[in-house]
Image (spheres, rainbow, N blue to C red):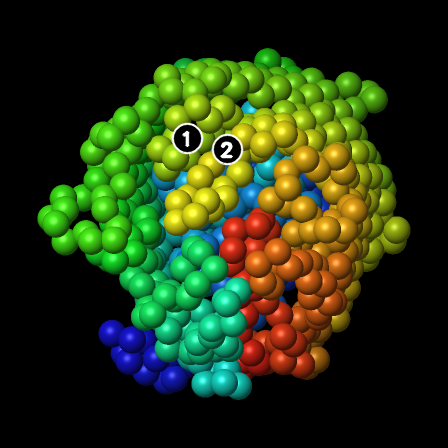
Amino acid sequence: MKRTIFLLAALLLPSAARAQDLDYFNFEKASLQDVINIRSDAASRLGFAEREAPAIVTVLTRDEILDSGARNVFDALSQVPGLDFGVDVEGNIGLGIRGNWAHEGKVLVLVDGQRYNEDFMGTVQLERIPVEEIEKIEVIRGPGSVIYGGSAELGVIKITTLNAGEINGSQAAAAYGRTAKGAQDGSFNFSYGRPGPGAQLTAQLYLADADKGDRRYTDFNGDSYSMKGASPLSSRSLNLGFSEGGWKARVIADLYRTRERDGWTDTILPSPLRRDFDSYFAELRRDFKPSELLTVTAALNGTYERPYWGFNPDYYGRDRSSRYLKAALNTVYAASARSRLSAGAEVSVVGARLASYDVALSTSAPPLYFANGRRSVAYTNSAVFMEGMEEFSFGTLSAGARYDDNEDFASAFSPRIAWTKAMDKFHFKAIYGMGFRSPGIDNLTANPRLKPEKSKTTELETGYLACTDVYLTADVFDMRIDDPIVFYTSGAGQEYGNYGHTGTRGFELSAKVKKNWGYANLSYSYYVAYDNKVDFYDSGVSGTLLAFARGKAALSASFSAARDLVISPSAVYYSGRRGYTAANTVTDLGDVALVNLYIARKNLLRGRLELGFGVYNVFNAPYSYIQPYDGGHSPLPALSREFRTRAAYRF
């Protein structure tokens, strides 16, 4: 199958210029005013424009993502201020937000409303999400627990894929890349969409194979191996959507397979270890309109997952699966043209079961049972939530709260209050919110006494339309985390505990430019750690936490060089990164710049075909993902310089 995908990509099977339809945001034809006032539903059930949302929100549109030549979601998110990446264990790359490690259950990732955080530790494998299918990405930098509960303590990434009107027929896209050291990646997408006044149907297929790395990984003991050929990734997914009247249904089958040798200790494995992440999602939703002012939404979600699957009798004696079921009811009432209210409740049950295999096969790695020696567990969570907003002459006041009650750990209360004001040239925001992280199944297995991690965040933001083509934004933040749930290793064991508190303060600056020649987005973000009492996060330098750059500058631009010829440079500059390179040795890894260049020729064959070519990591910078805690993992080298082609065709 891998050869088939590479062949399809090499033949440049192609999607082309987008049909002009009213169902989606047309970034190319939009004015800057349209861009800064794009609607975002990630931060509230009441619906706000980005400038008025009760959160610090960044929206990435499809045009911006594709124009940049983004190979994956990491490339797209690298342009968001305050976001960074670090390595966890077993080759897994996770998110940091404003200097804080957020991989395990602290950032909620939604794809078409489906929760992609697995149930055991709350992690997300972002590489599995096909960038070709994305219509927009909404990013909340700050707590989202008031809306989403215990997986959204520090942020939310809401990904919406193409709708039927956007596809309007069928389209295909393929890409193939090869690095300077010989690693390869290939992908193929096919999308079908049938819009209509009644029923609408979408079907999207994704096939991809890649090497995670092509450099040498060196563990704390000085042993090393080449990642090329030893860290393959494989993705297969099918995303089906259907809507008619007030009914909506979604089914996603997502099979993500990996191999790795870096492990979760300070010693590399003798051979690649299988790590599979198979997930199946289903949702049925019904919207009712009892009156013009009242909307009632009932939803049922189900998930079956097998994350970190790959039994090995000498190393990993535990394969397990989880089942998640959630029933939710929400109401939205438009009390007046200036006032809206929302309230609802949800009940969810997550269960897990160990796979059956011969215990006698497990020599050095006996089966790891759940808490109290059980082979299966189940946890129930109930929640109620409310939100309201009122427009006044001095701005919009919004307030909301959510209360979560879990049968196995302490309850959590998540309030948020915000004032926002948007005018022609200015906008202002003042936000205070609380969030929490729920312990996952494996967290509770390691430590049944864990309690939810909780955070308090204060944010101020202002924006200014300097001229018709330039919009400037600045925000400051203060995030404090109490009782953080920390992973650490103890001998050959994995442990979790609540440890003191930590936090960061900082600012984020951004500029949007949109002119006839194209557009540019520029940002700079900076954080300072304060009052950190978690030794596992300590970098040895005051104000800096492990792994994440204190200063980050990002640029993404797109220029129309000639008719239908687009040149798009992008760059990210990281400064002040520190991490463990050996036991008890923290090193300054220096500043690094990652520069990409992508060129696209659009509207070939009467608007059906688009061709693109990109160079990634142009200067072959030695960038590595650093572990954001003292867990015994060396920096994981990223790919060297890559040359990549892409083609897309609309049938």
Location of the N terminus by quadrant is: bottom left
Circle 2 residues within 10 Å: few <14, some 14–19, many ≥20: some
Q: Quadrant of residue 642?
A: bottom right
Q: Quadrant of residue 475?
A: top right
Q: Nearer the viewer, residue 553 or 223?
A: 223
Can residue 7 be seen in this snapshot? yes
Q: Which mark is residue 447?
A: 1
Query: Which residue is drawn at the image coordinates 65% and 31% (left, top)?
Result: 501
Q: Nearer the viewer, residue 367 or 141?
A: 367
- The first of marks 2 and 1 along the sequence is 1
Residue type of the residue flagged with mark 1: Asn
On screen, residue 410 above or below 228:
above
Circle 1 residues within 10 Å: few <14, some 14–19, many ≥20: some
| 2 and 1 marks in contact (CB < 8 Å) | yes
Q: Position of residue 236 (x, y in %)?
A: 30, 61
Q: Which mark is residue 497?
A: 2
On screen, residue 602 above or below 104:
below
